């Protein structure tokens, strides 16, 4: 890598969060000695990394992990306590959208104001005003006061103005949590463009799908520490494990399960539901009834779900889901799509639901199995275990992709003359 | 990693710009020009917003000091100080000049005081030199001062309120001195207010005190003689008195007449306020973002 564009070197930031009214002199006078009525918050703790020119970097992590504080130190909004941040080139001055917007001003006036924050002059902005309003789809509202705009309208205006930032380094904090789906699509086109232009972008986001799609590299923060720095798929997978682990410690053990289930749960396993019917075991088998965790493409695969009714007298449905860490659901066959529903059960009864795939259609990769039980109309969840187990599929033919589709190729040549196998004209 | 994960990340060739907004600018204004441009935009915005929603709008920027003047004129020039000033001293005109200048100092320091704290949102989301907020707040009050000053000069010359001569030109450097003093005080106030909101109340009281110590509503000569040279050390009093001498009447003293060599003291205080304001502001400024 050539000389880094952003270099963050052993940066730490500590906040003193006053526990009471430290903002008034009355407090200072009445508590002259106790200057320690603060909660120390180590927002960022000894973080170092370099970002090269043209890198598209994501920073993610749970709320309060310090990712926004880190971004604010890169943009010079906060000064680090220790360590140093070096940035080369023009940096976009704002990290969130709508900075400087005033509700009492019209859309047009707000473009000039927010544009000035970007370092653009009135003359420069005047040449782009129509384009800004057009991209934001607000041309006919140019003279309407911003306070009468819907939040989506002002978000659109904010994004359009931000696009004027002709910066070498773009710092963006959760900028995609705005606008409707169609406008979001337009925003993503802009990201595509930045990526193609090889601009350096640092994107702070919770949206793992976007990070996986755009970033060359993702940093994962937890409690102020940089705990992972690597390829997007690897880091987002680690983040998902982290989140599920946090929810386990937060809510007891959702993936609980005594008995046979306990030994199978993976790190990303999560469990929900009211448990009127409960999943007691899940097995992946071959046709001979042997438990397996790896299959060859084209082999038969059997999923068996053991259940027990804890009070339900009636019907329920069962669904099995196949996914990958980056694609939660590739397929989710369910009994309600089958010709015959499951028979009604009585409280206390137990049983086994079996789903058989005559030929595994997945290609070589790891896949995750999820299982869920719903009521008859599929709107009340009795028990659902996401990512209950992981299994590998190997394709001996080494085909690329995730699914082996049953398509047929054919060929027809116009004109005469084909080559036979030896290469001679027949 | 499977080959699949990278299989689809291929070069799709150059695509057209999603929007002309993304065109790169051929050149960028210099850093200082960008900062002055932002200052101007913020100042104009503050000026617009100050009167937004009121029926008379900008008229208030004129009407307010004039109404204040009418009240003071009634109370002081007509009732309380009747017979204590000579027609040559032209106290009503002195009062007018004093109130316009004082009104600026009062309004501008108040605006500067809250300029950083009231823009907390902007400050936490964007980087720009923080002094821009203070300068913009003061610049917005300077616009009001310019309007008011022009009005009273035009009216005054038209109705021969003033004693006009070469010395009248001194009003320009005096107003510059006033703006510099306001800037120094404003930087100091804005920085401290970010940490201690009590300053808002303290400054209200201090302003009231300064108002009387600047002889705005009474002629300077009514101050007991031995206190005159002390009061004149106060830069706001010095500026207002010299402005009156420059515009209103030749019988009034220059500050040099009262202070002699000590006239450097109010000037030094202005320089000191600028230096102290700038120092405190730059010391505390790096942490405004996390303090708000």
Image (cartoon, rainbow, N blue to C red):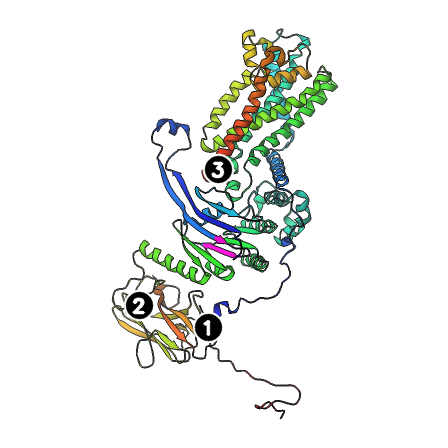
Q: In which quarter of the image is residue A309?
A: bottom left
Please report whichever mark, 1 or 2, sits nearer to the chain's N-terminal start.
Answer: 2
For the residue pair A420 and A165, the one nearer the viewer reads as A420
For the residue pair A337 and B275, the one nearer the viewer reads as B275
Say few, some or many: other residues with alpha carbon within 10 Å of mark 3 (under 14 / 14 to 19 / 20 or more): many
Determine whether the residue tagged by mark 2 lies in a helix, strand or loop. loop
Residue matched to label 1: A402
Task: Give the CA separation, mark 1 to mark 3.
Answer: 52 Å
Mark 1 vs mark 2: tell me if same chain.
yes
Q: Is residue B272 visible?
A: yes
Task: Give the CA separation, mark 2 to mark 3.
Answer: 52 Å
Determine whether the residue tagged by mark 3 lies in a helix, strand or loop. helix
* Image side of residue B76 versus residue A9, left or right: right
Residue matched to label 2: A264
What residue is drawn where x is 47% and y is 45%?
A84
For residue B40, above or below residue B182 = below
Q: Quadrant of residue B106?
A: top right
Q: In which quarter of the image is residue B92?
A: top right
Q: What stretch is highlighted in magenta?
A: A50-59
Q: Mark 3 lies on which chain?
A: B
For the residue pair B14 and A55, the one nearer the viewer reads as A55
Counting from the top left corner in percent of width and height, residue A238 is at 39, 60
Residue matched to label 3: B288
Say few, some or many: other residues with alpha carbon within 10 Å of mark 2 (under 14 / 14 to 19 / 20 or more): some
For residue B221, above or below residue A368 = above
Determine whether the residue tagged by mark 1 lies in a helix, strand or loop. loop
Q: Mark 2 lies on which chain?
A: A
For residue B79, above or below residue B291 = above
Q: Which chain carries label 1?
A: A
Which of label 2 and label 3 is nearer to you? 3
Magenta residue check for A58: yes
């Amino acid at each position: 890598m050539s000389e880094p564009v952003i270099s963050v070197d052993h940066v730490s930031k500590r906040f003193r969060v006053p526990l009471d009214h430290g903002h008034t002199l009355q407090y200072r006078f009445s508590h002259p000695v106790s200057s320690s009525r603060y909660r120390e918050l180590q927002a960022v703790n000894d973080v170092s990394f370099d970002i090269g020119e043209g890198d598209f970097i994501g920073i993610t992590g749970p709320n309060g992990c310090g990712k926004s504080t880190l971004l604010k130190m890169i943009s010079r909004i906060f000064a680090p306590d220790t360590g140093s941040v070096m940035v080369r080139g023009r940096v976009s001055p704002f990290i969130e959208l709508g900075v400087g917007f005033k509700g009492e001003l019209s859309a047009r006036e707000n473009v000039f104001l927010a544009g000035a924050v970007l370092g653009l002059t009135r003359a420069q902005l005047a040449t782009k005003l129509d384009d800004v309003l057009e991209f934001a789809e607000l041309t006919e509202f140019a003279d309407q006061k911003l306070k009468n705009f819907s939040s989506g309208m002002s978000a659109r205006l904010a994004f359009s103005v931000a696009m004027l930032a002709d910066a070498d380094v773009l710092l963006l904090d959760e900028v995609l949590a705005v606008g409707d789906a169609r406008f979001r699509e337009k925003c993503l086109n802009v990201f595509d463009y930045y990526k193609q232009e090889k601009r350096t972008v640092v994107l702070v986001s919770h949206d793992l799908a976007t990070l996986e799609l755009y970033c060359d590299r993702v940093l994962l923060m937890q409690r102020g520490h940089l705990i992972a720095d690597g390829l997007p798929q690897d880091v987002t997978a680690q983040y998902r494990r982290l989140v599920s682990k946090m929810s386990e410690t937060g809510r007891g053990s959702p993936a609980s399960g005594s008995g046979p289930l306990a030994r199978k749960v993976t790190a990303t396993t999560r469990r929900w539901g009211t448990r009127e019917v409960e999943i007691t075991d899940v097995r992946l088998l071959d046709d001979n009834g042997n438990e397996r965790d790896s299959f060859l493409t084209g082999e038969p695969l059997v999923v068996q779900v053991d259940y027990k009714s804890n009070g339900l007298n009636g019907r329920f449905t069962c669904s099995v889901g196949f996914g990958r860490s980056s694609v939660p659901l590739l397929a989710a066959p369910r009994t309600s799509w089958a010709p015959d529903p499951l028979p009604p059960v009585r409280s206390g009864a137990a049983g086994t639901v079996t789903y058989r795939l005559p030929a595994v259609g997945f290609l070589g990769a790891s896949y995750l199995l999820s299982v869920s039980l719903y009521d008859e109309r599929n709107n009340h969840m009795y028990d659902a275990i996401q990512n209950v187990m992981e299994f590998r599929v190997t394709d001996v033919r080494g085909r690329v992709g995730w699914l082996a589709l049953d398509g047929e190729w054919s060929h027809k040549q116009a004109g005469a003359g084909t080559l036979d196998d030896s290469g001679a004209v027949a | 990693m499977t080959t699949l994960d990278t299989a689809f990340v291929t070069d799709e060739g150059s695509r057209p710009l999603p929007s002309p907004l993304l065109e790169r600018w051929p050149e960028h204004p210099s850093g200082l020009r960008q900062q002055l441009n932002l200052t101007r935009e913020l100042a104009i915005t503050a000026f617009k917003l100050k009167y937004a929603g009121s029926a008379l709008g900008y008229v208030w920027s004129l009407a307010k000091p004039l109404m204040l003047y009418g009240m003071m004129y009634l109370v002081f020039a007509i009732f309380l100080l009747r017979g204590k000033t000579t027609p040559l001293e032209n106290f009503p005109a002195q009062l007018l000049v004093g109130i316009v200048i004082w009104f600026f100092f009062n309004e501008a320091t108040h605006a500067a005081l809250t300029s950083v704290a009231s823009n907390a949102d902007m400050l936490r989301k964007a980087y720009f030199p923080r002094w821009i907020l203070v300068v913009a707040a003061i610049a917005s009050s300077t616009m009001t001062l310019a309007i008011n000053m022009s009005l009273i000069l035009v009216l005054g010359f038209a109705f021969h309120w003033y004693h006009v001569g070469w010395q009248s030109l001194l009003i320009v450097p005096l107003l510059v001195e006033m703006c510099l003093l306001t800037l120094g005080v404003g930087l100091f106030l804005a920085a401290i207010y970010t940490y201690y909101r009590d300053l808002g109340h303290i400054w209200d009281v201090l302003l009231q005190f300064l108002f009387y110590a600047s002889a705005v509503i009474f002629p300077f000569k009514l101050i007991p003689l031995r206190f005159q040279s002390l009061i004149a050390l106060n830069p706001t009093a010095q500026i207002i008195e010299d402005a009156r001498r420059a515009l209103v009447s030749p019988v009034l003293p220059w500050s040099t007449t009262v202070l002699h060599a000590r006239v450097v003291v109010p000037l030094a205080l202005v320089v000191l306020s600028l230096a102290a304001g700038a120092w405190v502001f730059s010391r505390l400024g790096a942490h405004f973002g996390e303090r708000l």
